[in-house]
Image: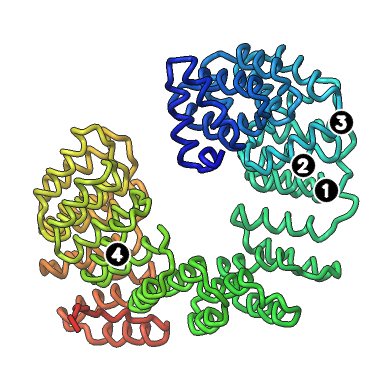
Amino acid sequence: MLFATSFVPVRILTIVISRCKYAKARHWLLPFVLSCCYCSTFMLKWANLKHTFFPPLHLALNSSRSFNVPLLPCSFHRHFSYIASHSNLYFSHALFVKRGLETDTVVATDLLLSYFTTGQVSLARSLFAFLFQSNTFLVNCTLKELSDDGFFEKILHLYFLLRISNAKPDHFTYPYALKACASLTAFKEGKLVHTQILKSGFDTNIFIANSLIDMYSKVGSLDNACGVFDEMPEWNLVSWNCLISGYVLNGFYGSALEICGLMKFEGLRLDKVTLKILLPACGLRGALRLGESLHAYANVFGYSLDRVILTAIMDMYAKCGIMDAAEVVFEEIPCKDVVAWNAIISGYSRKGELDMVLKFFHEMHAKNVELTVVTMLISIQACADMASLRTGETIHGYITKSGICTDISIDALLINMYSKCGKLDLACQVSQKISEDVTSWSAIIHGLGMHGYGEAALMSFFRMLKRGINPDSVCFLIVLSSCSHTGMLKEGYRVFDYMVRQFDIQPNMEHYVTMVDLMGRAGFIDEAFQFIEGMPIEPDINIWGAFLGACKIHGDLKMGNLLEHRMVELGPKTAGYYKLLLGNYVSKGRWDEIHRIRNIIREGGVQRVLGHSLIEVKV
């Protein structure tokens, strides 16, 4: 029997048996296969993949009895979706009853849910009554197993079957149903479960109440979560953690941090879970002082020895822009995983220190840290902003070689990176290999327009329309920018009108700024001013800045003089617009106004954004 204990021969024999047409051959081969305990599992899995479920199933059931080999019930687990789709539940059910497998909880539950999902509710109800016999404990055990395996839809189906049976849910049943509602973002079903909890009087159970807060938070109903919290007769640390997590999940970071103060007032001691929730909120809110306090708290109570807590502390400093502190914490993390590396890279990316992004990327690669999609997105964007072609090609090569699962965002960034590096041929090659959608088309249009190929960009836009891909507002903005950079005034008008009339996309301020820039670059100053006056929204500083820049380029000092008081009233926020005003005053010799603007810049603390150039040097 040594022959049958090897997996490869058993695998081959199983396939041969399931395909064999001769009964005698099957009868001779089966003893070798069935002597191995895992053969039936493989037979059913292979047959399921080959869409030939029933012949091997019937064969396995009958042969197991003929040769006195027990057939493992777990062999049939998770194979019922295929049976249900073929309306052969009666046949399968009969076979299981005949072989005594209907008493196995896993097999019977899958069969029960198959009846329910195919609309045969009466049969499902009958089987439910036979299987569980109004025993809620058995139902809870089944719900736990389904929850551990992530079958949340099955949990809800089984729960609603429980409601129409004689069995009654208890305080162990409801948390599983609520967890399923939260995982599926099923607000309506969660509300029904909550109603049943109120009717059964379990709303005062602290474990169920905490589950309700968690469910409502995850489905986006924070008001209901707060209502449940307020009605609780008593709270524990889990209750507070669920509420804080709900505020963070729904974007109310300030409120989450305020609740932290209430917890201290109640005399509760923060645990690891609380810190894992609050530290990201501090980073997203920019609450550096509270984040530092939580860091000190973690050090005092020994939580900083936990890798996850240290990663959260580092990420908090990175989001607050304190990269020196973030790097110190990063060095303290033992056995750094990809989450920690991505957090430090993201921090440097947000701060604009792109050279550090690529430095840490090279360290990750050198230390054989598995790169994720997040790593790729951040690193490729840094390569694009720095026009670092060599590193970008290295990343692209890694993606191709490793076979990492990419999404359209990575492909679009690769197109953008090659475009900014001046390699339009490589950008086009990437665009041809990916699935066509508006993001990839927008990336290639942007690259063509950036390098002055306005007509090619416009042709790509209309080619996209012919292929049935609808543009969005970002795509139209890119096309308008391409027309502006290449002086294609008529085409820009056409695209703008096409956006409003054909696709019913309402232009935002960026679209209006681009149109003003388009007309101003072409020398149509009066038309640009009329366009601004006819805008349905109030023009902001960006509109007047684009218009004043056009006036300066074409020497229209009279029109530029009309805008000076408007720009000063709006209060330019950057040094660039003040520079435009200064240039306008210098051209007219108005030195008093020049000194006044310089005093505003000096006293207002307006920061100058220094320009810079980058070149890639081979070392």
Give me the C-alpha separation between circle 2 and circle 3: 16 Å
Residue shown at 61% from the left, 72% from the top? 307
Which badge, 1 or 4, is on the more N-terminal residue? 1
Q: In which quadrant is the N terminus drawn?
A: top right
Question: Which residue is labeled 1 in the image?
Answer: 207
Q: Is there any visible trace of residue 529 in the rendered image?
A: no
Residues at marks 2 and 3 touching, judged by CB atoms closer than 8 Å: no
The residue to which callout 3 is attached is: 199
Q: Residue at x 61, y 16 (%)?
A: 92
- Pointer 2 and pointer 1: residues touching (CB < 8 Å)? yes
Q: Is residue 51 above or below residue 507?
A: above
Q: Is residue 422 visible?
A: yes
Helix, strand or loop at mark 1:
helix
Q: Position of residue 161 (x, y in %)?
A: 74, 23
Q: Secondary structure at mark 3?
A: helix
Q: Position of residue 155 (x, y in %)?
A: 69, 33
Task: Tell me the amino acid under the disc marked 4.
Answer: Ile
Residue receiving disc 2: 175
Residue type highlighted by circle 1: Phe
Q: Residues within 10 Å of mark 4 (few under 14, many from 20)?
A: many
Write the residue at 61% across / 74% down: 310
Reading the image, the residue beneath label 4 is 395
Say whether disc 2 or disc 3 marks the residue closer to the N-terminus: 2
Q: CA distance from mark 4 to mark 2?
A: 45 Å
